[in-house]
Image (cartoon, helix red, strand yellow):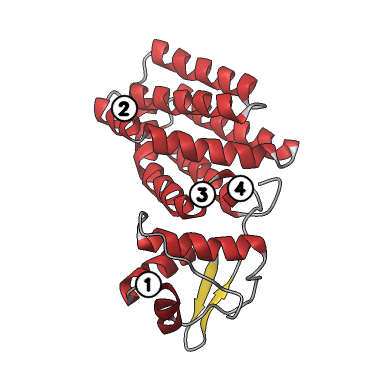
């Protein structure tokens, strides 16, 4: 692909660099849906990296639904993410942000399930307070990210297992960065998209409130997966 230019930056992980620079080409339109990417060997030569680095980047791009591998044919661009994605986050940072979502799905899903079984009235009230604050703050992505994190932390606290809180606090910066990115992209979309964000949080709260652990787990997993999709998909109302 003549239009694809990769410039190594040695201070960052090579797999994330390659991911980020291919992502930039897709977002900018230099690579469009249906375009075939250079072969593994060509990418190794262009980027001056080993085959494992190229395979890592391709695996992540496929996992995020941005490219698709067709056996015997090659790898092709499958979807163009929102234009604001790399404007709001460094291109090579996007891979790490999306990996954070992968970790959060099982972690927070289980925390929500336990919260539905164990939460005290006071803990349920803290979750509701955080939800109300998120509703008020959603028009400002910067403050909404803090409110969003407070909601998820309140759910973790209600699980009755301090390890969930400790892990979430360890991931605080990464989680809040991912929330800020998703909320900024949401703010650029339709009012329907913002409403759905609140509805997803509301379903988590309602499931915990009625003590339905399966529904709480499902609602949390659904919400985090949809937040991840809002980062990588063009649709303005998902």
User: Which label sits on residue 55?
Assistant: 1
Q: CA distance from mark 2 to mark 4?
A: 31 Å
Q: Would you call the spot at circle 1 few (<14 residues within 10 Å), some (14-19), or many (20 or more)?
A: some
In the rendered structure, which disc, 2 or 1, sits on the residue that comes first in sequence?
A: 1
Q: CA distance from mark 1 to mark 4?
A: 26 Å
Element under disc 2: helix
In the rendered structure, which disc, 2 or 3, sits on the residue that comes first in sequence?
A: 3
Q: Would you call the spot at circle 3 few (<14 residues within 10 Å), some (14-19), or many (20 or more)?
A: few
* Of residues 3 and 19, the one drawn nearer to the viewer in this rendering: 3
Residue hosting label 3: 90
Q: CA distance from mark 3 to mark 1?
A: 21 Å
User: Which label sits on residue 165?
Assistant: 2
In the rendered image, which quarter is residue 4 located in? bottom right
The residue located at (36%, 22%) in the rendering is 158
Residue hosting label 4: 87
Question: Is the N terminus in the top left, top right, bottom left or bottom right quadrant?
Answer: bottom right
């Amino acid at each position: 692909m003549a239009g694809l230019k990769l410039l190594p930056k040695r201070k960052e992980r090579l797999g994330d660099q390659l991911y980020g620079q291919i992502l930039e080409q897709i977002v900018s339109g230099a690579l469009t849906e249906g375009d075939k990417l250079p072969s593994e060997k060509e990418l190794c030569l262009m980027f001056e990296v080993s085959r494992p680095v190229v395979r890592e980047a391709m695996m992540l791009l496929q996992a995020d639904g941005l490219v698709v591998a067709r056996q015997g044919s090659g790898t092709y661009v499958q979807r163009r993410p929102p234009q604001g994605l790399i404007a709001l986050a460094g291109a090579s940072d996007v891979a790490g942000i999306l990996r954070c979502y992968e970790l959060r799905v099982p972690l927070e899903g289980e925390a929500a399930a336990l919260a539905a079984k164990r939460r005290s009235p006071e803990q349920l009230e803290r979750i509701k307070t955080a939800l109300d604050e998120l509703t008020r703050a959603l028009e400002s992505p910067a403050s909404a990210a803090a409110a969003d994190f407070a909601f998820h932390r309140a759910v973790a606290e209600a699980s009755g297992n301090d390890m969930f809180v400790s892990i979430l606090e360890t991931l605080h910066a990464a989680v809040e960065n991912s929330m800020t990115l998703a909320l900024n992209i949401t703010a650029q979309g339709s009012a329907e998209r913002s409403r759905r964000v609140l509805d997803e949080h509301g379903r988590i709260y309602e499931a915990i409130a009625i003590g339905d652990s399966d529904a709480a787990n499902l609602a949390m997993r659904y919400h985090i997966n949809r937040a991840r999709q809002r980062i990588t998909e063009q649709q303005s109302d998902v």
